[in-house]
Image (cartoon, coloured by chain):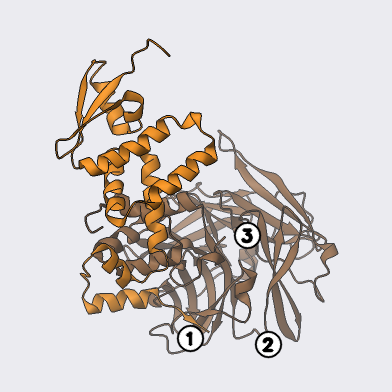
Chain colours: A brown, B orange
Amino acid sequence: MAGLNKDIITEVLIRLPVKSVFRFKLVCRDWLQYIKCPLFAQTYQSHNGPSTLAGFLQTRSIYIHFYPVNNSKLYSSRSMITRPIRNIQHSIHRIVASSDGRVLLVDRYNGWELLCNSITGELFKIPEFPHWAHGVGIIHQEPHVKLVFAYHAKGTMTTYRTLRRSKYIMFKTFTTETNQWTTMLVHLSKVMRFHVKEDAGVVVGDAMYWLARTGDVLQYKLSCVEEGDSKMISPPYQSCFNYNGEHCFHKANTLHCGSNGALYYCSNDRKEAKIWVLLSDDDHNMSWCMKYKVCLGVHGFHGRLGRASYLCLKQEVMFMWFFSTMGISWGEMIKFGLEDGKTEVVYTTQRHRLSRTSIVPYFFPLWPAASFVRSEAMI
Amino acid sequence: MVGVKKKMVTLVSSDGVEFVVEKRVAEQSLFIKNALNEGGVEEKVMIPIPKVTSDTLSSVLEYCEKHASATEFQENEIEEWDKEYIEKADLDLLYYLLQASYSMSIMGLMELGAKKVASLIRGKSPQEIRELFNIKNDFTPEQEEEIRREMQWNYE
């Protein structure tokens, strides 16, 4: 078989489970090269269907634990830990955003750091890190990574008052290619108010989206170089706000990039969750289209219902993360079949204080996730 | 179809053996189909098949013949036949079949062969793969260690 060319070997490899494929990186240099080729991942996915590993990350000291939720057999008391993250002496404060094997985290003493490879623990320190941001996001521009930080208003130091009134958004972007920050100020049609904690943006196609506290969606085009490329998209439902600008009925909205490359919007009012998909016509007019209505009331979730803070639409399955606080924090991840309406608890946290840890929903792409997970965990 | 003369093509293997087959059989290979289209509608055509020996070619043609008349059979019949066909191929033949189906662009056979090889190597270790296929390990121990390290996550 030594003389077989790349195309033939590829034909064979795409018919193997991911775990085998990854093991076969060790066969010889040629095979390694074939497997590492981005084109191979594409071929593999188009032959086997898209696969992702869903779960969430939890920080503990200098480790990041990964809890997969795709497969209920896998979750049971088993988690995967990254190797200790190199060069971090102190504990990780929190994970801010994650995307395709890359994690943006905050080290309590050193500020923002980008974990470039969650498998090897390779760490990239961001120079001149900003002290805070309202919205953050990771974009892949292989082999480089671009970070987008969004702020309510002009300047990083604003008073609460100006922050509430301002219709300006400041974007600070950083790319590992040039190792430099660039700043851009954008005027919006509406006041954009982010959530209190740093908000991780969702990348769909060539744009990044953040959810405002009002339910509006802020869109940032990756190609954005001028003013006006950024805009606000109204929420899909008739909204009603209380004094704090929080939504009275529908709350805990989340955005998610679906496997079909569309933006999904999820909201719930404790009794039911609604899921919309963003459609755009030929004239680039965008509109929301209701996709699913999920009744939550009948399933008897434990104690106080927290909030659905995440959703995943893959093979018509939705994952929801509920939590409750009564001195001790705990929560559970629930898998909800959109087709059959069946729910399944796939993970329950230990009842301990979460103050020193952070839990972030995380979707691994097939690569490099496949290197450490059993293939049956993929959906 | 009495009276209609079947169109024949002559295929020449790399070791000079001639195979006379029906055009519709030969056209299972996209490579031959294209060659025939380019060459127009000549009565007698000779097509050299480089890199494919007579042994392999006869096996390939066996496959083409069956699949050229696939419509006459039930689908599961063809499947059964495919299974049997690839089952009796040894590793060497499998290797040549893959190469031949690649160079002759016979997608069905390529898929069949690739599936078979995949089932053979599934679950094996890299070392077993090297032994099976006679591949030389050209990594330095450091490189190997590096790849191993990249691949490993700890289970709690």
Q: How many marks?
A: 3
Residue found 46% across the figure and 89% down from its top: A90
Residue A215 showing in the rendered view: no
User: Which one is earlier in the sequence, the residue at label 3 or at label 2?
Assistant: 3
Q: Are marks 1 and 2 in contact (CB under 8 Å)?
A: no
Percent across and percent down for residue A158 are: 56, 69
Mark closer to the chain start, 1 or 2: 1
- For the N terminus of chain A, the quadrant is bottom left
Report whether mark 3 lies on the same chain as mark 1.
yes
- Where is residue A289, by image quadrant? top right
**Outermost residue, left direction?**
B16
Give the number of the mark in front: 3 or 1. 3
Q: Position of residue A11 (x, y in %)?
A: 36, 51
Q: What is the CA distance from the residue labelled 3 to the residue labelled 2?
A: 26 Å
Pointer 2 chain: A
Query: Amino acid under label 2?
Result: His
Give the residue number, with chain letter if any, for mark 3.
Answer: A312
Q: Which residue is mark 1?
A: A62
Name the residue carrying label 2: A352
Q: Are marks 3 and 1 in contact (CB under 8 Å)?
A: no
Using the rendered image, report if marks 1 and 2 lie on a common chain.
yes
Using the rendered view, name the quadrant where residue A21 is placed: bottom left
Residue under the point 33% across and 14% down:
B5
